[in-house]
Image (spheres, rainbow, N blue to C red):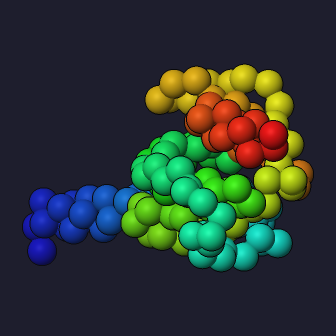
Amino acid sequence: MPPQPVIAVFAIAWAVFCVWGSFALARMLARSAWNAPLEPYPPIEPNPADGPADDRRFQSMRAGFVNLGWSVHVIADRRYLHLRTSRIGRLLALRDASVPWDELRFAGPTFLNVGPARSMKVGAISIAVPAWIAEHAERVAV
């Protein structure tokens, strides 16, 4: 076989390996940053009896050092912060969670790629969330 087809086969194989490896690495990092701290909070459905919930889709968050842009749908009701993963998040094997408001600790302001945000502690990990979530938490605490 002449060397050009061999080089082309190796180049294609290398490109496939790099793409697959990048996806596998992104999935591993996202799962370790998101799933572990949210494991104690299984997903539950929002209760309509709790009144209207604030439902926003495709929210950007940062868990630790992993940016989860447009990966989470958020439903905030009176008792829970419901985190539902979008298709992008499900592709990365992220799990859904419903975190009670009293389990969240809000820290100072931070910045996400989409605008102002607040840092929130869930267990041992910091998650940067859009600022409206902290504002909602302040409203339900009253």
Hey, which quadrant is residue 139 in on the image? top right
Depth order, front residue of 114/49: 49
- Establish if 92 lies above or below 75: below
Name the residue: 82% across, 49% down.
104
- Establish if 46 lies above or below 110: below
Tell me the quarter of the image containing the C terminus.
Answer: top right
Residue 128: percent from left, percent from top: 67, 38
Depth order, front residue of 72/132: 132
Name the residue: 68% across, 24% down.
110
Tell me the quarter of the image containing the N terminus.
Answer: bottom left
Residue 132: percent from left, percent from top: 59, 35
Q: Tell whether 22 sits left or right of 36.
A: left
Q: Tell whether 85 sits left or right of 97.
A: left
Hey, which quadrant is residue 98 in on the image? bottom right
Q: Tell whether 130 sits left or right of 78.
A: left
Hey, which quadrant is residue 40 in on the image? bottom right
Name the residue: 48% across, 70% down.
90
- Establish if 33 lies above or below 1: above
Depth order, front residue of 15/137: 137
Residue 21: percent from left, percent from top: 48, 63
Name the residue: 62% across, 70% down.
49
Q: Tell whether 141 sits left or right of 69.
A: right
